[in-house]
Every structure is written in C-alpha cells, then in structure tokens.
Amino acid sequence: MERGDRSLAVYRWSLLVALLTFPLIWLGGLVTTHDAGMAVPDWPGTFGYNLFLYPWSAWLYGPFDLLVEHGHRQLAAILGFFAILLVWVCHRYEARAWVRRCSWLLLLAIISQGILGGIRVLLDARIVALIHGICGPLVFAGASWMVMINSVDWYSASRELRPGGLRWVARGLLLLTIAQLALGAHLRHALPTWKPSLFTAFVHTHLLLAFLITFLVFAGLFIVYRRLYRPHEALRSPIWCLVCLVFVQVTLGLGTWVANYGLPWQEVNEFLANYTIAGRGFWESMIINGHQATGSLLIVCSLWLLCRVERRSLADRFVRRASSLELSDARTGQPGIAGTGSS
C-alpha cells in the first residue's frame, strides 16, 4: 500500500484498539460497582507476581473482586501493547502527519490512564478513582476518533453541506454528554460525608442534563430530515444510534436508581413497600454497569455525529475559499492557488 492512500491497516488497528477499550470500561465499571479497587493492594504487579505470571487458577477461581480487578489490569496492559503497535502501523502506512501525532496522543492517554489506576491503588484515594473513572470513557472516545478519521466516510465526505444548526446540536451533545459523565462519576463515588442537600443537587443536575441531552438528540433527528440535509444520508446513522441509546440509557438510569436506593413510591403501593434489595446481585450489577457503559457510547456517538458534520463543513469552507481565490486571481490576471489543482 502506498503512503497517501487510505490505509486499511491503520483503520483496522484503530478499530481493534477501540474495540478493546470498551470492555475495559465495562470491567472498570464492575470494579467500582463491587468496590473492588483494592482487591489487589500492590501495583504494577499482583501480590508480588508479574502481572502476566500471576497463577491463572488463583484469580479465575478466586474471589470475584480479584477476578475483575486483575482482569481489568491485564486487559489494560494488552490494550497498551496494541496501542504501541498502532503507533508503529501509523508511522509505516499513514501519510498524514497529524494522524500519526494523534496515534502518539492516544498512546500517551492510555499510558496516563494506566498510571492513574496504579496511583489509585497505591494511595487508595477516592479522588484519583473519580478522575480515573472520568478519563476512561474519554480515552475510549479518543480511540473511536482514530477510527473515524481513517474511515471511508472521512475520505468520501461530500463538500456541499452548510451545517447550520446541526453543527451546534452536535457540539452541544458532545459537551453535555461529557458533563453528564463527570456528574455520574461523582454520584458513583459519592462520599458518606456528603450532606443530603449536596447529593440532591447532583441528582437534580444529572436529571436536568439528561433532559437537555434527550432534547438535543430529538432536535438533531428533526434537523437531519429537513430538505437541506436529506442528500446527506451519512448523518442519519449517528443520530439514530443516539436516539436508541437515549431510550436505553433512560431505562437503565431508572433501573440503576432502583438497584442503588430502592423503589421511591413505597408509601403508594403495598407491594412496592414490601420490595427490598438485599444486595447487588448479578442483574443489579449489570444494570448499573450498563448505565455507565451506555454513557460512554453516548459520548462516542455524539463525537461521531460531530465528526461527520465538521468534516463536511470544513471541506465546504475549503472549497469556497479556493473558489474565491481562483475568481480573485482570474480578475487580476495572475495564476491562482486553486488553479494548481489543490482543491
């Protein structure tokens, strides 16, 4: 494959890194849900063993806390290895220098996230766990960005879109989903010393952002079917994914509240009053974890929509600028930049 063409190797390795990052977020969520962050008290090894030399029977058949914590570490190390290979593949096959720099930034983010996880264990600090939990989905978004900029759509995007309101919807969605991630992380790592008023304020803000995200998603759905955007069918895929994820996320959010705090209408219904949750079983853990993981997917799909919109709008601005330069040079009788075939 020649440098300068779209590299399938870079795309496939980027996709592999992104696919490995998502289950890592899921495992990290299980660590938080089961409060298993200190199941292995040392780092970077495991009870004095090398990470990959720890007896497999000890953690596969040992306590569940050890299983998820050690498994989380092993998958993180494997992800780091593949991220290093992605950097090598980019330098071997990728002609765009900025994409090669992005691969280095992604590797740095993955390494930094691993170090944060180690500091969380060594210091047993809840604030470090909070930062670690927020940064994980952002690393996943960065890995997904690498896939987007190496996709067929990035190379074949039309240059006729004037994004208008859709650009602001996409930008707002990305910012709000990241803010929602931070609020959700604070609620998952809430301290027993919090005053009830502070906890209530976080919950109400979380619900407000959920409403705003839902509103923007459906606003985006309305916009992409307007006459201006109908020819650009590629914009519909991310917005429909967002619509589906919003329904899933709202359902999982209600389930998470029930799993954590019980049903809120006990005084209304006798059956509900007798319903109690003795502990976080398998399904409760899956619901709580699913809510956290779906939030990460909302961030990625918001970035996906923004990427497709901005790619087309940037191309549109480039074409209009090149055309204006060509027209200006034609009037002055001088050869123009656009006339060289750069557009």
Image: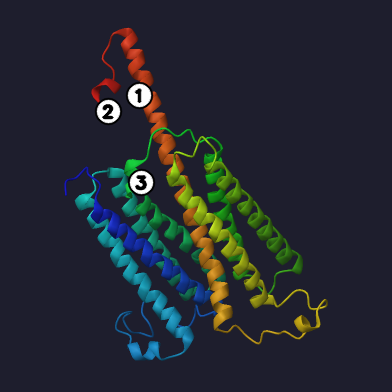
* CA neighbours of label 1 inside 10 A, class few (<14), some (14 to 19), many (20+): some
For the question of whether residue 115 can be seen, the reply is no
Sequence order check: which comes first, mark 3 or mark 2? 3
- Residue farthest left in this picture: 2
Separation of disc 3 and disc 2 at Cα?
20 Å
- x and y, in percent, of residue 27 in the image: 45, 74
Q: Are marks 3 and 2 in contact (CB under 8 Å)?
A: no
Q: Residue furthest right?
A: 267
Please provide percent x and percent y for residue 222: 58, 44
Residue marked by disc 2: 342
Asked whether, in this view, residue 213 is left or right of residue 82, the answer is right
SS for dot 1: helix
Contact? badges 1 and 3 (CB < 8 Å):
no
Residue 11: give its label.
none
Q: Seen in the image, is 325 located left or right of residue 131?
A: left
Q: Is mark 1 in CB contact (under 8 Å) with mark 2? A: yes
- How far apart marks 1 and 3 lie (CA) works out to 22 Å
Residue holding disc 1: 322
Q: Amino acid at mark 3?
A: Asp
Q: Can residue 204 be seen here?
A: yes
The tag earlier along the polypeptide, 1 or 2, is 1
Q: Residue at x 49, y 60 (%)?
A: 297
The residue singled out by tag 3 in the image is 153
Q: For label 2, count other residues whose C-alpha is less than 10 Å away and answer few (under 14), some (14-19) or many (20+).
A: few
341 or 80: nearer the viewer: 341
